[in-house]
């Protein structure tokens, strides 16, 4: 197989607890590309992220999904991760007693990306410095007692250490102040390049000023209703979703 | 040879001794004759024989405790109460169950150690190490021997303390142990001596620290400190179904004792242990107590805070797999004012496993300015597993600060998904969560034990260990 690996969904439908949320999603993200997925609250963006990553609660009821020409349906989350998929969680879960260092080493080992301890520590130090993460983070338990901003940085740190081929950022910008947002966005851009595809899920165009997506999709009610270039994000910022969707949308409950 | 010995036992009503066969064991079941045979075999002084016989009396008078785990499976008449540990233990490697052998393999336990742990050999190949350590200890006046030797060679100290912390009539199983005890450790640390290496039961040449009815007595004299470690994480295979130990600690003024236990009995064993410490003025006693394996464990390390400004620290961890019940906890009895206790318990149940936290805090009327902190957390690995908490508090002084926190949680789908989304397999993810849950406990262990325990927990997740 040659050429960049692609995440492809075709007519993807998925339900959570019997309720259909995704109603036929067609999307294609290749290594080296940055896509933004926008849309009002409740349109199914996070559901798409979880479905692609393989959360057992999200049941695929139709359509197809593959990465690097490999069928993702039927693969467990850990197998998808080994293929090179990564999800930056909007609300990452705390694992008390498991330090960031131990967690990262376990993940690298599981993915066959283990490296000598010295190299690991060096890389970790570099990445932490770039993300302005305090050294004490190493021995803190993963996401346990982290502030909102710390959780987001920790997710990006994992992204940087694990170097996946395709990363989905699920509202990584939410709850961040301007400075933190810039740090996090710059963290993503440090990694961005020909080897990684990025799908950024966001409500707000602000993060896109840093990430400069090649393609912008707008999702509504379980479907991608519009796709376009960077201009589309700017238009949303100016006009909101309503003119684009041609329908009233509930006010997003943003913090 | 073992078979032969067993055959021969039948001819001797109350046990026998034969130089050529080198195995001595009393007849099955309990009687004053059996107790006398044990005492006689050890050439004990008269007072110890009396002590044993009186204890037997207590044992017989007391009913079986019914307030805790189900003990109905114990048949007291079907147990050998004393087997002299000798080179040839009357068991061969072939007698050791496959599951235990497999676990030794997985844990990477060296050959000599395996034989020792499985009760195949009575000696652990650390004679040289032990010898050197013992010489160093002797230079600073520390006594570290098995309890039988302690009685023989240091009778004055031994007698002064033996049975003073846990009298024979304390409870049914303490009475049983007092009647038939054998082996265990005897430690005396003189005034002001800091023993800076942990004393490990391992180092001792004899295997009788692994006995069924071991008895441990540790005295830390004024201003001294000592850390004692018993057990190991490898499954401690025993074909005997009852393990009932007694551990007594005495921390004199300003002394510090830390007692670390990691036990992993095979799943046929009733593990019923009485552990208690006395802390005098300004003394600190720390129990670090890890319980894996066994069929039933009942164990509540206690500290009697007798002197002002004494402190108790109890940190316990229990893992109950299918068919196992870990009924563990702690007691702190605040007799003196300005005393503090901190009790932290973590337990995990898997399959039909059950953990119970049972704690007792008592503050006597004169004990003002007491601080108590109790925290117990239970983790359930599946729908079937179970955990209960039984905290008892008797506070008879108004000037007391008590904190009590208890949680029960389940391994969450979201936690598993988070870890698996990073490429970690589901089983390893569960093991990580479990290890993390035990982390506050594991942190207190010496490095090699911590590593072993984590590996063991990972194996338990596979169901490789009962």
Image (tube, rainbow, N blue to C red):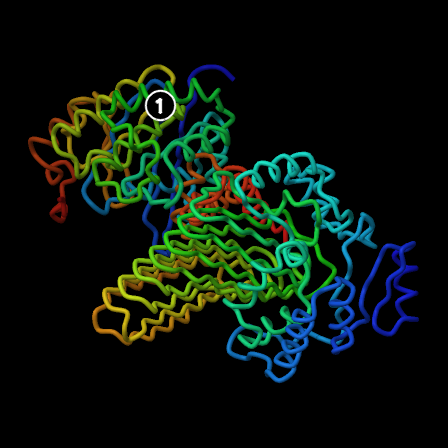
Q: Is residue A94 found left or right of B67 in the rendered image?
A: left
Q: Position of residue B277 (x, y in %)?
A: 46, 61
Q: Position of residue B149 (x, y in %)?
A: 67, 54
Can residue A60 be seen here? The reply is no
- Vertical relation: B139 (above or below) B216: above
Instruction: State the image quarter where residue A142 is shown.
Output: top left
Q: Position of residue A200 (x, y in %)?
A: 26, 30
Q: Is residue B284 found left or right of B348 in the rendered image?
A: left
Residue drawn where x is 48% and y is 63% of the image: B276
Instruction: State the image quarter where residue A172 is shown.
Output: top left
Residue drawn where x is 17% and y is 25% of the image: A182
Can residue B319 be seen here? The reply is yes
Instruction: State the image quarter where residue A188 is shown.
Output: top left
Name the chain letter of the residue that bears numbered label 1. A
Q: As rendered, which of A106 and B179 lies closer to the eye?
A: B179
Quarter that holds the C terminus of chain A: top left
How many numbered markers are drawn? 1
For label 1, the crowd category at 10 Å Cα-Cα, with few meaning under 14, some 14 to 19 and many 20 or more, is many
Element carrying mark 1: helix
Q: As rendered, which of A171 and B104 lies closer to the eye?
A: B104
- Vertical relation: B413 (above or below) A189: below
Residue drawn where x is 86% and y is 66% of the image: B16
According to the picture, the residue beneath numbered tag 1 turns out to be A124
Q: Which residue, as the protein is rendered here, is positioned at the far left?
A: A238
- Vertical relation: B205 (above or below) B361: above
Q: Position of residue B205 (x, y in %)?
A: 70, 45
């Amino acid at each position: 197989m040659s050429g960049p690996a692609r995440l492809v969904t075709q007519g993807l439908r998925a339900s959570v607890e019997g309720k259909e949320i995704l109603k036929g999603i067609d999307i294609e993200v290749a290594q080296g590309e940055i896509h933004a997925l926008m849309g009002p609250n409740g349109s199914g963006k996070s559901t798409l992220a979880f479905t692609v990553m393989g959360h057992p609660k999200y049941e695929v009821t139709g359509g197809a999904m593959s990465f690097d020409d490999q069928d993702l349906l039927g693969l467990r989350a850990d197998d998808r991760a080994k293929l090179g998929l990564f999800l930056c969680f909007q609300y990452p879960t705390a694992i008390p007693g498991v330090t960031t260092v131990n967690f990262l080493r376990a993940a690298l080992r599981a993915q066959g990306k283990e490296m000598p301890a010295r190299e690991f520590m060096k890389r970790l130090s570099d990445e932490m410095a770039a993300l302005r993460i305090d050294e004490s983070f190493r021995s803190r338990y993963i996401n346990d007692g982290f502030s909102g901003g710390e959780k987001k940085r920790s997710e990006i740190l994992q992204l940087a250490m694990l170097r996946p081929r395709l990363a989905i950022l699920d509202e990584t910008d939410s709850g961040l102040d301007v400075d933190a947002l810039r740090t996090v966005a710059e963290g993503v851009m440090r990694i961005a390049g020909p080897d990684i595809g990025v799908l950024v899920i966001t409500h707000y165009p602000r993060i896109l000023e840093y990430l400069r997506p090649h393609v912008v999709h707008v999702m509504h009610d379980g479907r991608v209703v519009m796709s376009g270039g960077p201009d589309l994000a700017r238009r949303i910022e100016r006009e909101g979703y309503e003119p684009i969707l041609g329908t009233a949308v509930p006010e997003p409950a943003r913090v | 040879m073992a078979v032969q010995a067993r055959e021969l036992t039948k001819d001797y009503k109350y046990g026998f001794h034969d130089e050529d066969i080198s195995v001595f064991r009393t007849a099955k079941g309990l009687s004053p004759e059996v107790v006398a045979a044990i005492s006689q075999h050890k050439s004990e002084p008269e007072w110890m024989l009396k002590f044993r016989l009186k204890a037997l009396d207590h044992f017989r008078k007391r009913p079986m405790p019914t307030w805790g785990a189900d003990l109905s499976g114990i048949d007291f008449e079907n147990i050998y109460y004393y087997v002299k540990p000798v080179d040839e233990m009357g068991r061969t490697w072939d007698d050791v169950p496959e599951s235990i052998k497999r676990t030794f393999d997985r844990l990477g336990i060296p050959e000599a150690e395996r034989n020792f742990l499985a009760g195949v050999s009575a000696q652990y190949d650390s004679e040289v190490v032990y010898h050197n350590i013992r010489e160093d200890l002797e230079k600073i006046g520390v006594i570290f021997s098995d309890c039988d030797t302690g009685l023989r060679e240091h009778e004055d100290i031994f007698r002064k303390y033996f049975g003073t912390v846990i009298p024979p009539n304390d409870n049914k199983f303490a009475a049983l142990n007092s009647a038939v005890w054998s082996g265990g450790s005897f430690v005396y640390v003189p005034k002001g001596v800091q023993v800076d290496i942990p004393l490990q039961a391992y180092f001792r040449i004899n295997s009788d620290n692994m006995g069924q009815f071991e008895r441990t007595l540790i005295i830390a004299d004024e201003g001294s400190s000592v850390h004692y470690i018993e057990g190991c994480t490898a499954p401690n295979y025993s074909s005997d179904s009852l393990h009932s130990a007694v551990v007594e600690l005495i921390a004199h003024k300003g002394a510090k004792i830390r007692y670390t236990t990691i036990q992993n009995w095979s799943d046929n064993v009733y593990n019923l242990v009485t552990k208690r410490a006395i802390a005098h003025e300004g003394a600190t006693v720390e129990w670090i107590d890890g319980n894996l394996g066994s069929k039933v464990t009942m164990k509540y390390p206690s500290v009697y805070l007798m002197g002002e400004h004494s402190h108790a620290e109890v940190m316990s961890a229990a893992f109950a797999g299918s068919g196992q019940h870990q009924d563990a906890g702690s007691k702190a009895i605040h007799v003196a004012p300005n005393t503090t206790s901190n009790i932290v318990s973590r337990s995990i149940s898997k399959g039909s496993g059950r953990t119970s936290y049972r704690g007792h805090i008592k503050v006597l009327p004169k004990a003002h300015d007491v601080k108590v902190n109790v925290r117990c957390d239970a983790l359930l690995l599946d729908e079937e597993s179970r955990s209960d908490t039984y905290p008892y508090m008797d506070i008879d002084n108004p000037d007391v600060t008590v904190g009590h926190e208890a949680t029960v949680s389940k391994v969450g789908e979201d936690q598993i998904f988070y870890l698996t989304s990073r490429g970690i397999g589901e089983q390893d993810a569960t093991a990580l969560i479990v290890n993390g849950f035990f982390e506050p406990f594991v942190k207190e262990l010496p490095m090699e034990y911590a590593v072993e325990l984590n590996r063991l927990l990972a194996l338990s997740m596979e169901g490789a260990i009962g």
